[in-house]
Structures are given as structure tokens and as C-alpha cells.
Image: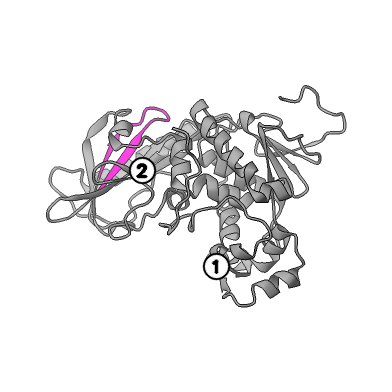
Amino acid sequence: MRLLFVPILFWLLTFGGNPASDQPVPENADTLVLKWNKAYADDTIDKAVIGLRWALSYSGAMLPDAPYAIVADSDQITIRLSDVGFDDQAMQYLVELHQKIKSSAEYQTTKSIDLGRYVALLIGAPEHYYRITGVPENLDGLLAQYELSESKGYVNNSAVSYEHRIIRFSEQQRLKQIFITSEVDSITGQIFEFETIDIMPNGQLRYAVFDANGTRINNANPTHSNAGKPAKCMWCHESIIQPLFTAQKDFTGFLSYLDFKQKLTAENQAFHEQKMALKTGVDFLKTTQNTQTELLYISFMEPSAERLALEWGMPLQQVKTLLAGLPAHVYPEFPFLGNLYDRNAVEPFAPFKGLPVSTHVREASVVEVNHLNHD
């Protein structure tokens, strides 16, 4: 049930259109409480809210200016699912996921879920991401929503794929367009797999990988491509249609390298203009804000002892004693995170068990979780 009144002392701070408050929203079936655990010296709950907003946006949320959609209080963030702006299909899956979260020992013990764990469950588990964003199980089902152009591009010098790539696309119609890449053998023309990018109504790109038979799969085959999982596509693309970074040869029957490069540049410019016209959602002009999402899941999947002390509610020295036999490392991209441990290695020491996550967010995982049984 939504609140029908606002206490007079309730003050709001705006985070890109959504507020945060110094008083928590009462929890009910529509709400979920997320625990923010400070991960580095300059980390703040304001940054955490920005990262959460981008993670929800990546998952298809429209993020309207609803006053109680995302509310921050000290080290907790409450989201009201019905106000975040997901469509009915996504809501069915998210309700199921939230129920599983609330049944976990972590939530039962702390009355919250670690914010990084939530982001890892949202975008780091491909089956969750696919279902919430509405990616069909088969490529034919996705392509049926578009009319592909007769023009197509050829990439023989990819920065991502180890194979040659044939790229087909539909013409952009406002916020509707698809790009489909076929990973092919340069000699035989055999197709190894397909990767797709299409535009969601909230201005974010939606990513998917399909095998040679057109069946949806969790990640690109590392034998043929370095594309990884959808979350890696988010990290690389940063919400834009990527241009060609390296020169390509020209092939008969395909757009020339220069024509294809110009085409992608024009499509990206039109896409940018459409995103800027949106009235709600994340601030696409602030092109580095998506990094806050990456920091949320990286600091969870590779936590410091200090972060684990907050997460587990333990003295720092006790945590360090527990982890004494484990190797530590520094994350090259974000060295300020400090000495880090692998989540899979530290999880057995946790005083409570959270809902399991995949062993990696961006790359192919030994364990890929799927907590959604809803068909």
C-alpha cells in the first residue's frame, strides 16, 4: 500500500530526479531494503544511489520522478518497486526475485540485502537480466520485432572478436533499432554465434548473446569472442552505439569501411539526441556516472576487509583474522579500493548467507545462478 501522507519533517534530497530521505520508508511487499557498505575513502551513499539508478536503468526501468521510488537513509536504501518504472512482465520477475531475496538468511538476519549483491543479481546473472529486460529465448523472436536493412557491414579487424563479423541492422525509428553481429569463420563463412544490441524505451541499450542455432545463451564463447556477458557489454559500450575504432578492409557486397563508419556515427548521434529528449531516467549527459554501478558490483565481488567488516557486522581485526590464509590483490582499474579478496573465497566465512550470485559479473562463470522459475 502506498503512503497517503508525508510527515511534515520529511526532507528530500534529489539524486538525478529521485529523492533520498533521512527517514526510511516503511517496508511492505512492494519495497526492498538495500544495505550500503562503504567500500573506499571517497565512497558515499549519494554515489551508491547513482549507481543503483544506473543498474535499474540498465535493466529497463524508466525511473520516473516518483517521490518514494528510491529513498536513502543513513546506510540503507529503500526501493519501491511499483514506482521505479518497470513494465508488467519485468515486475513479475522482479517480485519473484525480491521474494527469494527476502527469504535468504542475509535478509532475515539484517532486514536488508547488500547493495552490491543486489546489483550482481540484477545485471550479473544473464537469465535475470534477459527475463527482466524481455529478451526472447530465440533469435527469431527478437528479429521478428524489426525489419533489417539490406545494407550490412563487415569487420575483419575487431577489438572484441577473434573472428570476422558481419553486422546487420534495422533503420533507427526514434528509440527503436537493432544491431545483430554474426561471428563467422573468415574462410568458410560458418557462423559461430550471434550478439545483439537493441534500444529499450528508456534509452538504454539491451544486450544478448545467441548460439549458432539462435538459442539465447549466458555469454559469448571465449574461443571466438572476448565479449563476455551482458554486464561486460554495458561496461564497454557505456550506453552508446560503438563506432569502429580500427580500420577495416572493404568486402564485396558490404558497406565500405568509411561508409559503415559514417553510418554508425550518424546512428549514434541520432540515438544520443533521442536519449536527451527523454524527460525521466538517468542523466545521460553525465557520462561517467555509470562507473558508480561498476564500483558497486566490483567492491562486492572483490571486497576489502574493511568493507566485509561493515557487511558482516564484525570488528575489522576479527575479519582480518578470518581471512589471514587468503590471497589479496589490487584491482588495476580502481586501485583505491585497496587490498581485495575474491567473493567466492570469503563467502564461507560470512555469518549469514545471502542469495547466491554468479561467480563472475562480466565474464563466463563456473556457476551461473537463476533464481527465476516464473515462465
Q: Helix, strand, or loop for circle 1?
A: loop
Q: Residue 308 at x, y = what percent?
A: 68, 63
- N-terminal of the pair, mark 1 or mark 2, is 2
> Residue at 27% across / 28% down in the picture?
147
Question: Is residue 93 part of the magenta span, yes or no?
Answer: no
Amino acid type of the residue tagged 1 in the rendering: Tyr
Position above or below: 22 against 338: above
> Residue at 12% across / 56% down in the picture?
187
Q: Nearer the viewer, residue 123 or 101?
A: 101
Q: Nearer the viewer, residue 184 or 239?
A: 184
In the displayed structure image, the side of residue 227 where residue 95 appears, left or right:
right
Which corner quadrant holds the N terminus? top right
State the image quarter where residue 226 is shown. Answer: bottom left
In the displayed structure image, the side of residue 354 where residue 132 appears, left or right:
left
> Residue at 55% across / 54% down in the picture?
294
Question: Outermost residue, bottom direction?
Answer: 325
Q: Residue 49 at x, y = what percent?
A: 66, 45
Question: Which label is found at residue 331?
Answer: 1
Q: Residue 205 at x, y = what percent?
A: 44, 40
Which corner quadrant holds the C terminus? top left
Q: Nearer the viewer, residue 334 or 214?
A: 214
Question: Outermost residue, top direction?
Answer: 4
Magenta stretch: give its range.
Answer: 167-183
In the displayed structure image, the side of residue 299 where residue 58 appears, left or right:
left
Q: Marks 1 and 2, how far apart in space?
A: 33 Å
Amino acid type of the residue tagged 2 in the rendering: Thr
Q: Which residue is mark 2?
A: 265
